[in-house]
Amino acid sequence: MCLYCKDKDGGLVGDYKNGKYLKIGLLGLGTVGSGVAQLLAANEDHIAQRAGVNIKVKQALVRDINRVRPMDCVVPLTTRAEDILDDPETQVIVEVMGGQEPAFTYIMEALKRGKHVVTANKDLLANYGKELFAAAKEAGVDIYFEASVGGGIPIIRPLKDSLAGNRIEKVYGIVNGTTNYILSQMDQGITYEAALQQAKENGFAEADPSADVLGLDAARKIAILASIAFGARVRAADVTCVGIKDLEPLDLAYARELGYKVKLLALAQEIDGAVDVRVRPALLPHHHPLAAVDGVLNAIMVQGDAVGEVMFSGQGAGRMPTASAVVGDIIEVAHNISSGVKGRNGCTCFAAKPFCPPHKVRSSYFVRLEVQDKPGVMAKVAKAFGDAGVSLWSVIQKRQTERGAEIVIITHPTQGQNFDQALSALQSFPETFAIHQPMIVEGDEAYVAGHH
Amino acid sequence: MCLYCKDKDGGLVGDYKNGKYLKIGLLGLGTVGSGVAQLLAANEDHIAQRAGVNIKVKQALVRDINRVRPMDCVVPLTTRAEDILDDPETQVIVEVMGGQEPAFTYIMEALKRGKHVVTANKDLLANYGKELFAAAKEAGVDIYFEASVGGGIPIIRPLKDSLAGNRIEKVYGIVNGTTNYILSQMDQGITYEAALQQAKENGFAEADPSADVLGLDAARKIAILASIAFGARVRAADVTCVGIKDLEPLDLAYARELGYKVKLLALAQEIDGAVDVRVRPALLPHHHPLAAVDGVLNAIMVQGDAVGEVMFSGQGAGRMPTASAVVGDIIEVAHNISSGVKGRNGCTCFAAKPFCPPHKVRSSYFVRLEVQDKPGVMAKVAKAFGDAGVSLWSVIQKRQTERGAEIVIITHPTQGQNFDQALSALQSFPETFAIHQPMIVEGDEAYVAGHH
């Protein structure tokens, strides 16, 4: 099993037209890996022009050499990582296997051997960014990772390079297509469970969707973006995280009625030198650019002191969009190699910055309560918020449930601890049947400006 | 008049903290130039970290040394270009004066002297890109121009680098804030003249707005984007161009009623190896991402064979957004200099490609007619389109004007020449009072897919 891609004239890809070529090793040949191989083959001449060299997949690491792969091109396969890592001809390792191990070990070995690395692995970057950059620096090579956030959307390099003159104040967006698809479906009135089932049937959710629906995937991505934006290391574990699985269609319906759309928002901002990084279900006003980002699309807003707000959007996942990002990085590495540049894409975590304690961060909150329908309950609810120092912006009581009355509250911006204190008080009331998943309210600048 | 910026401790910016520094010369200190000087001063340490060197404006070329400028920092001024161009310490020339001359001569002189150039000058890039890149290559230096399109929105480098693995099929968007503001106002029902007046009063239109409203500014920008996207030189003169000044609020109202928004669209696509580049008033369906881009915002969609559609949006003009793009480029040049790289950002116009003859390009068209209100006229109008081989998708006749009846037509996609032929026939009818500015209909994929 060691066939080369044929080009349209039947020649071998190995017939390098310029006499210059770059050999890459693919770690993984699943969805993304096969997309990378296919894109490199399909756009071979186009890419050679832009990279200044022909680029060839010398070998791909797979688990099962006999598995049928959805590719038009054929690449040499191996099941032994060392065939690729120890090959002196292979100058670039492209890691598209995902997961922490053995990907981490392979990448570290590749860096030690002086090979440049391109990876799509958000899990590694968000947990071992420090170690990876240190190893790359030590070896005098580069590690690129555009595909780790937002699929094919150019965001890492624009944020790191094009916007480098800005102090970034805030980065936020929709960085997980699975949950955005589920929320878009729930917005039509179906339950979380039914929407998840649809997502699975359409290939937008994995068999075990935990990492997506719990917000962990989004946490990794915002950790990567925050590290670049604020010049300080943020790991996935530093991100406080709430997922979407406790949301109900009714929450989305109320939000809509109030002029908002519900999105799983990944958000990072710098407040007085401290970094606040969260993943939260959030209400966004209908006119907000992110409110229009539906289905599996991703979109990321960057707010800088000079540029104002810029938005990047597109397909945040999928085989060919992700391959687009990986190949863009490979071309960049090719430029670095041909111009003899090393360490171009070094770590930009220049400082250590403290994290905002989550209970100190100010947000406006949405919460739906079910309470006993009898005189004095509304007053008691309102008093619980008042006693906790939380002032209310909007209170709606209109629907009767089987158990009693439903109250929907939006607060003025308040510290997390005050809001939690109010909820604790409510929880202790015998009149309270249920406190549904609270959400934050974001992007309502007119409101915030007027009431902060 | 030769004062240096003071930093917060009162020291001179010239006290380079790393012992490393990069001196730049500013050609122009107007809106953008003063923004660049201010951003470099305000974010000095931040930028030094990311650039790896301190960056200092050594001198700025101005016409009037005594004019008061809206800046918090002070930079040395000169009225003699040679003070900057001939200064051996100045390694980077930042051209932010705009216009063709003397900017072109200065840049060519700077390149000849081996200085890297950063420019915001769309006019030059869209007309003399070939000459500029040739001179840069000859001298072994780089020319960067992110600010020439889309203000602070990162688009040039993402398109050139991050998306380099894609064959770009289409680039289109809203690249002129003045006309987008005017159209947003007209969408509220006011006339073009009143909207233009508002734009002037709010500083969104120049005293002579011709370049904006005739679409010439957008033409320059799409020429630059198309050159990169298709790897072939496209100059401003190659762009067929229709502006917005003949539109009436009624056209926007009809469009809205039919589910569309009117935007001045700059559009470039490759069709069978030929390049179609146009600026046109266009109807976009309400659900289209560009339809939500209102006021002075800009947004650019890029469609690639791997990435699908990605969108970049933000403030497309203005002092600090444009300065953000310029400073991002300066930082890139600083990296190139420190790593000894030359010619990194070379010309990517690898091929010459023919242009699609405008009369052969297929589009769907919107046009509003005023005709005599008598039996048989509608049939005659319909026959004019039919005789020209144009089939109609939607025909609305509902309003009586003072003169007669108003008919609004949307055609199926048709070649420009067929549409023009139908209009010529209509023009010749004695029953025709007026044929208002036609517009193209774009982005209606469901419709196009079903009827193409």
Image (cartoon, coloured by chain):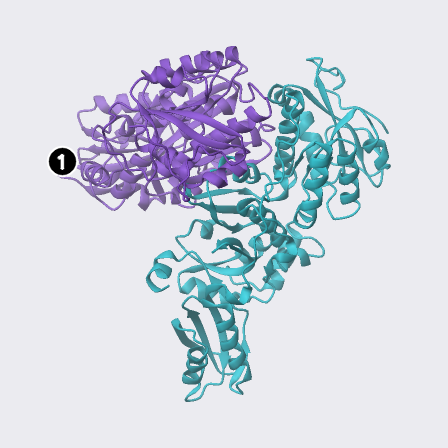
Chain colours: A cyan, B purple
Whether residue B172 is visible here, answered yes or no, is no
Helix, strand or loop under label 1: loop
Of A19 and A74, which appears nearest the observer? A19
Q: Is residue B349 above or below residue B371?
A: above
Q: Chain of mark 1?
A: B
Q: Is residue B187 left or right of residue A75?
A: left
Identify the residue at image location x=13%, y=39%: B402
Q: How many marks?
A: 1
Q: Is residue A141 above or below residue B296?
A: above
Q: Quadrant of residue A245?
A: bottom right
Query: Residue A322: x percent and y percent?
Result: 63, 39
Query: Residue A16: x percent and y percent?
Result: 72, 15
Identify the residue at image location x=33%, y=36%: B177
Q: Quadrant of residue B357?
A: top left
Of A58 and A68, which appears nearest the observer? A58
Q: Which residue is mark 1?
A: B403
Task: Find the residue positioned furthest to the bottom.
Answer: A375
Of A443 and A189, which appears nearest the observer? A443
Q: Is residue B444 left or right of residue A280?
A: left
Q: Is residue A294 left or right of residue B393?
A: right
Identify the residue at image location x=22%, y=32%: B377
Query: Residue A419: x percent and y percent?
Result: 49, 72
Query: Residue B21: x percent and y percent?
Result: 50, 29
User: Looking at numbered disc 1 in the image, what kind of residue is underneath it?
Assistant: Arg
Of B65 and A143, which appears nearest the observer? B65
Whether residue B360 is visible here, answered yes or no, is yes
Q: Quadrant of residue B212?
A: top left
Identify the residue at image location x=58%, y=64%: A191
Q: Tell me the quadrant of the picture where the N terminus of chain B can be found.
A: top left
Give the crowd class for mark 1: few <14, some 14-19, many >=20 residues within 10 Å.
few
